[in-house]
Image: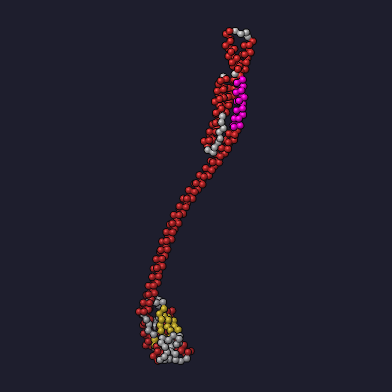
Amino acid sequence: MTKRFILIAACALPLITPVFAENEQADVAKLRVDHERLIDLVLTLEADFGETLRDYAKLQDDLANALKRPAVPDQSGKVKELQKQALDVPILLMARKDFDAKWATNSTDLKVTQAKLLEAEKVAATAKVLKKKNAELLEKYQRLDGDFETLTGMIAGMEAELTKTREEMMIAIKEGMQVKELEAQLILLKRSTVQIDPVRYDKGVADVNDQQVRVLNQVQGVLKLSPSARFEIVGHTCDLGRKEGNLRLSRERAKALHDFLMQKGVPPDLIKSRGVADLEPAAPNTNEENRRKNRRVEIEILDY
């Protein structure tokens, strides 16, 4: 029994070593296993030590009884065995003392180990929370990344549509400019091909019947080509005479032609008249030929 106790105590020494917890879950599990093994070993040692004490007490009783009885030859071997076991008692006591010291040290180490175990469990719990948060952040990032790709695709589509719209606008603008240019050219062409010759007047005359018929025919020809055309009748004079009289005469000449056209069926909203006297001469008033050119009524075609 004594040898078995010493052997168990000797085998227990390398097992009672401090185990330090790390931040990983595997180290926490190892600490728990070592802690349970240490407790089992202590319980085993206590049980063996108690059994040894009982054996020691029994040996003392057997030794006392043997000393009281007379020695007999067949008991000498047993007495020697008892004496030998009695010699082992001091060794057992020393082993108990050493065990108590190691138990105190191991108890301190056990408390430190337990504290580290609790700290490791806290770290593991924190790591679990951080891992969960990291997974949540990763999920949010992946969702945002998907949204970003969707928005990028939408922006690209909008940019392509905008580019297409700009191109169509440029084409429309160019076509519109071309249409306007063609319309302007058409107007110029019409004006160059269709003209109304001015009415010439003698000095002081405001009505010339034969020329009015010719003007009527030309106005009707213009309206056949362009029903929306409008006309402005402008009366002119030469520089001879007073300014007030010339202005009145120019207005009378324009008004006479205006009224004649209205009487012949030209809509009144298509014609208007005014007089400018000698302010817009067709030729310098230096001789009678030029002055005759200036005594005139011109019919200007508008909105042709």
Where's residue 37, x and y in %?
A: 55, 29
Q: Which residues are magenta?
A: 90-110
Q: Indicate whether residue 177 is drawn in magenta.
A: no
Where's residue 49, x and y in %?
A: 59, 22
Q: Main secondary structure of the magenta part?
A: helix
Quadrant housing the N terminus: top right
Quadrant of res 293: bottom left
Quadrant of res 201: bottom left
Position of residue 287 relative to residue 227, above or below, is: below
Residue plotted at (56% across, 25% down) = 10
Q: Indicate whether residue 99 is drawn in magenta.
A: yes
Quadrant housing the C terminus: bottom left
Position of residue 261 relative to residue 84, above or below, is: below
Could you say which is closer to the camera, residue 292 or residue 221?
292
Whether residue 21 is visible, yes or no, is yes
Where's residue 78, x and y in %?
A: 58, 12
Residue sticking out furthest to the left: 193
Position of residue 252 relative to residue 87, above or below, is: below
Quadrant of res 289: bottom left
Residue plotted at (59% across, 34% down) = 112
Whether residue 201 is visible, yes or no, is no
Where's residue 238, x and y in %?
A: 43, 89
